[in-house]
Every structure is written in structure tokens, then in C-alpha cells.
Image: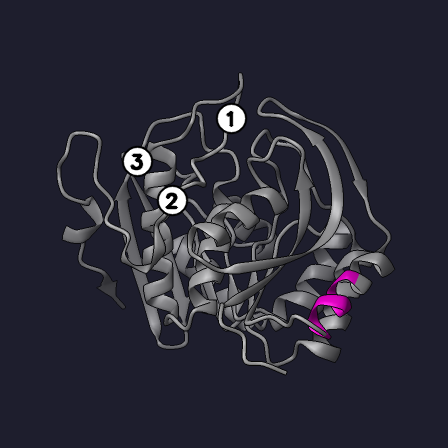
């Protein structure tokens, strides 16, 4: 078999008919970074920028067969996991990874609640995710709400974010990026927790309703960069810059939470500029090690 000439990401997630999140956002994000994406679709949703109208989970064995089909032929450098719909799918995904993907890095975006506030995973399925899939994750990327649900830790400030991240590592994940976008403040603080230490990253908050699919896009950007061999800390930083610019240049579609601009040719040398022409705000930030 010839050696692949392009980095590969296998995306396991649901379909978003509005194109702002899920498989659609993941594919577009990987393409922006020059990475090939294959997919295993877990659910079909009818949704737009305002609300999720319908969710139909696919049979768990069909999800597993999609994964096996890709891993036995095209292969993957990273597996990115998003919406899983139910416990049966979670168990099936975990089984395939144990059988065919044990040595492949896993980026797990625990999609528990939609942007519009709809619950996307039942309590028993969350328990299955915690027990069977979370311990396989090399990087888990919950927002503050999801981190609190997964760990039982109150996440209202930096201390809570760190404690939740540490709890996720104790649950088996190698690293955890706790996203602070749902917390109040003029800046957004994310905390990366790994065995090597904690890294806190801050960025100016962009006040926009066009933020649908931010979590999916960030996780896929990190997966794409990791697939290209970038170290975790650098991949997180580059992905955050991509998100900043994708929100700033959002196409302003729909009546509700609109999608980001996934069409950025960001690559590994992304140079984000604010709308007023000032330099990239990330460039002046110093990461705080603890």
C-alpha cells in the first residue's frame, strides 16, 4: 500500500442539515487545513439556525460498519468524534476503536447540548460515554456546561475549569481543553489540562449571534492539525486563531445562531487580523503555565 500523501481524519458525528455544525462543519474545516476527511455518520438531523426540529439516530451497527470500512482501507491519522446520539452508538464506536483504532489519536468533542439549548444525549448515554469512550480520548474538548455534566464539578471560573479538567484526566482522558465561551466576561478563557501542566489561553470575545458549530469546528481544526503532526499545545493555539477569524468573518446566514466562515484557507501559518487592521490579538498573549 502506498504511503498517504495527505493527512487523514475520520470524523464520527451527526449530520446538520443547516451546514453549520456536525459532519458538514467538520469536512469544511478539515478542507480549510488541507486535510482529507472521511466520515461515519451517527445521526441525521433536521435543523436550521433557530432550532433542531428532528433527530434520527442511525443503527449502531451501521455506524460501526462505516468506521470499519474506512479504517480497513483509507485509514486515519486522527479520529474526531462529535455527536453520538445514544448509548448503543457510543458502545459501538468504542468497540471499533478498541479493535481497529487503538493506536490512533482520538479527539472527543462531547456534544451534549445544541447551541439552541436542546439536549442531544440522554443521561444513560452520558454514563456510557464516561465509562467506555472518554478513557480512550487523547483530547476531550467540553465547554464549561459539558464539563460540569461530565465531572459533577461546578464550572463558573478558572478554578472550576482546572478542577474539571483534572477530573477528566482522572477519568482516563490524556488531555482536556475546557472551553470558557459560555462564561461571562469580555474575554474568553480556555484551559488546556494535560499531565505536563495547565495552559490558560485568553482571547477577546466577539459579540455575535453567528456562533453555531463553534465546538465542532474547533475540535475538527485541532484534529486536522494533530493529523499533520503538530504538537497538542500548538494545535490548540492554531485552532483557536482559526475560530476567532471564522467567527469574525461569519457569513451572517439565518435568523438565529448562524454558522461560521469555514472557507478560510488558514493552514498552519494562519495570520489572523482584526477588522480594524490591528495585529492578531493572540500574538501578544503569553500563556500562563501552572
Residue that numbered label 2 is attached to:
243
The dot on residue 205 is 3
Quadrant of the image occupied by residue 183:
top left
Image marks 3 and 2: residues in contact by CB distance under 8 Å: no
198 vs 25, nearest the viewer: 25
Residue 83 in the image: state x and y as whole percent.
66, 49
Earlier sequence position, callout 3 versus callout 1: 3
| Element marked by disc 3 | loop
Image marks 1 and 2: residues in contact by CB distance under 8 Å: no
For the C terminus, which image quadrant? bottom left
218 vs 5, nearest the viewer: 5
How packed mark 3 is, by other alpha carbons closer than 10 Å (few <14, some 14-19, many 20 or more), is some
Residue 107 in the image: state x and y as whole percent.
54, 63
216 vs 72, nearest the viewer: 72
For the N terminus, which image quadrant? bottom right
Gap in angstroms between the C-alphas marked 3 and 2: 11 Å
Quadrant of the image occupied by residue 8:
bottom right
Q: Is residue 122 in view?
A: no
Q: On the picture, is 276 further left or further right than 4?
A: left
Q: On the picture, is 101 further left or further right than 9?
A: right
Q: Is 167 situated above or below 22?
A: below
Query: How many numbered circles are shown?
Result: 3
Residue that numbered label 1 is attached to:
257
Gap in angstroms between the C-alphas marked 1 and 2: 15 Å
Magenta: predominant secondary structure element?
Answer: helix
Q: Is 175 situated above or below 33?
A: below
Magenta range is: 66-72
Residue 34 in the image: state x and y as whole percent.
44, 57
Residue 181 in the image: state x and y as whole percent.
41, 41
Gap in angstroms between the C-alphas marked 3 and 1: 16 Å
Amino acid at each position: 500500500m502506498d504511503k498517504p500523501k495527505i493527512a487523514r481524519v475520520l470524523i464520527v458525528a451527526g449530520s446538520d442539515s443547516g451546514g453549520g455544525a456536525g459532519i458538514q462543519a467538520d469536512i469544511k474545516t478539515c478542507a480549510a487545513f488541507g486535510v482529507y476527511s472521511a466520515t461515519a455518520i451517527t445521526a441525521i438531523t433536521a435543523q436550521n439556525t433557530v432550532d433542531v426540529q428532528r433527530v434520527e439516530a442511525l443503527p449502531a451497527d451501521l455506524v460501526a460498519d462505516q468506521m470499519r470500512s474506512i479504517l480497513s482501507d483509507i485509514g486515519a491519522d486522527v479520529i474526531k468524534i462529535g455527536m453520538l446520539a445514544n448509548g448503543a452508538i457510543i458502545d459501538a464506536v468504542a468497540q471499533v476503536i478498541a479493535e481497529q483504532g487503538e493506536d490512533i489519536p482520538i479527539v472527543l468533542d462531547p456534544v451534549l447540548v445544541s447551541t439552541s439549548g436542546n439536549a442531544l444525549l440522554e443521561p444513560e448515554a452520558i454514563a456510557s460515554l464516561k465509562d467506555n469512550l472518554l478513557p480512550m480520548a487523547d483530547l476531550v474538548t467540553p465547554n464549561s456546561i459539558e464539563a460540569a455534566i461530565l465531572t459533577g464539578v461546578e464550572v463558573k471560573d478558572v478554578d472550576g475549569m482546572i478542577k474539571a479538567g483534572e477530573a477528566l484526566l482522572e477519568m482516563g482522558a490524556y488531555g482536556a481543553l475546557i472551553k470558557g465561551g459560555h462564561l461571562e466576561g469580555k474575554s474568553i478563557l480556555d484551559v488546556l489540562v494535560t499531565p505536563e501542566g495547565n495552559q490558560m489561553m485568553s482571547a477577546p470575545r466577539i459579540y455575535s449571534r453567528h456562533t453555531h458549530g463553534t465546538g465542532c469546528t474547533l475540535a475538527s481544526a485541532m484534529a486536522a492539525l494533530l493529523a499533520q503532526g503538530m504538537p497538542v499545545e500548538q494545535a490548540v493555539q492554531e485552532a483557536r486563531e482559526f475560530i476567532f477569524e471564522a467567527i469574525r468573518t461569519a457569513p451572517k446566514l439565518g435568523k438565529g445562531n448562524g454558522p461560521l466562515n469555514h472557507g478560510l484557507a488558514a493552514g498552519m501559518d494562519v495570520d489572523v487580523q482584526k477588522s480594524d487592521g490591528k495585529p492578531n490579538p493572540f500574538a501578544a498573549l503569553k500563556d500562563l503555565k501552572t
